[in-house]
Image (spheres, grey):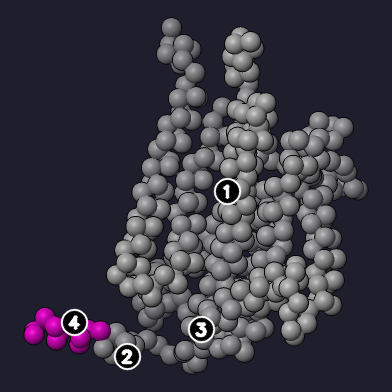
Amino acid sequence: MAIADAVNTAIIGKGLMIGGGFIGPGIGIGLIGGNYLQAVGRNPEAAKFLGQALIFVAIVELFGLLAFASIFIVK
Amino acid sequence: MIAGFARTFADSGPTVHVAPAQVFQLGHYSITNSILYGWVCAVVLIVLFSWIARKVTVKPKGGFVQIVEIGVDFITNTVEGAFDDKKVARRYVPFFVTLFFFILFNNWLGLLPIVGEGFQGHSGAPLLRPFTGDLNGTFAMGVLTMLLVYGASIKESGGLLKYLRHFFVGSPKNPMFFAIGLLEMFTDLTRVISLSLRLFLNITIGEIVIAVFSYLGHVAAPVTALPFTLLEFLVAALQAYIFVILSVMYLAIAVNHSASHPESDDLTEDDVPETMVAQTTATGGSVRG
């Protein structure tokens, strides 16, 4: 019996997709937040750039959401 | 009791819709639930804001009117800060303020319990769906915004050829610069897709996450779904702000660039911007010192 008959490979694929897809944005958002806090720590004047940091969070987050959206294509 | 509890998690899972469903047909056009809710939100927005426009006074009296005023002021300052010339910025403020409040209203009213799976029509499909949780809606918004950005950029730079000239760093006759310019143009076109996909995915996935957690909570659904609803409340405001500020930036880059180069001059090697020259000399000096 082929392995595809015994195991529901779609579920495993979805799990891998979500897990793998969120690694990158997780690291990215961590780097953005960490660097923002570092900038504020060195120069408290930089605290006003939170809005601009959030834009980059949104750009990075899109790639994670694309991975999440792709699980609906897998049947 | 335990068997019943286990059976709850064993069945197929929460009902989740990614695409909108048709509610009724108007001529040849099928009216989906997201369009229906978009109309509802638009009517609410128009009525509420024309009422507020009559209530605004020079000395603020507080209340709901002032909250809206803060939002309008915030977007106005954002747009004016992005442009070099405040007079040019003033022309585009109304569009962006409208866009911000339309997205914000759709996102926030989309979190109401009557919107989504909880409130179904006679066909079994949800009767209402947030307009921003529909790719057709956000794609239309993205296309409209980018059309305005392109139109305004062409107008501000004074002609289509002068606008296209900004994509090329050096002389377009150089095949290398020509290829880079074409690549830049293509990158510009992907902005429509990234703008619309970001908004759509954030709102739809928020709806799905709320649906999943209220399903997992079963009887205690209000308790388990509450934190995620509050999170979506924040995300909705953030996404409205991000949609606006990104489109403002796309517009401001093109307009500011054409303002700083009034004539379509050829940038050659000896025509390096002054800041770059200053930077190179500064680093050179530090290395030597």
Which chain does the residue under circle 3 lie in? B
- Magenta segment: does it hold B287? yes
State the residue in front, A47 or B272.
A47
Question: Pointer 1 indicates a residue of which chain?
Answer: B
Tell me the SS state at disc 1: helix
Disc with the residue nearer the chain's start (4 vs 2): 2
Residue A54, image x, y percentages: 48, 61
B61 versus B246 height, above or below = below
- The span from disc 4 to disc 2 (Cα, nearest Å) is 14 Å
Which residue is labeled 2 in the image? B274
The range drawn in magenta is B279-289
Identity of the amino acid at label 1?
A: Leu
- Same chain under badges 3 and 4? The reply is yes
Q: For mark 4, what is the residue?
A: B283
| Image location of residue B143, percent across then percent down | 65, 62
Find disc 3 in the rendering and name its residue.
Answer: B256
Q: Is residue B83 above or below residue B133?
A: below
Which of the 4 image quarters holds residue B270? bottom left
Residue B228: give x, y in percent of width and height: 59, 43
Chain letter, disc 2 residue: B
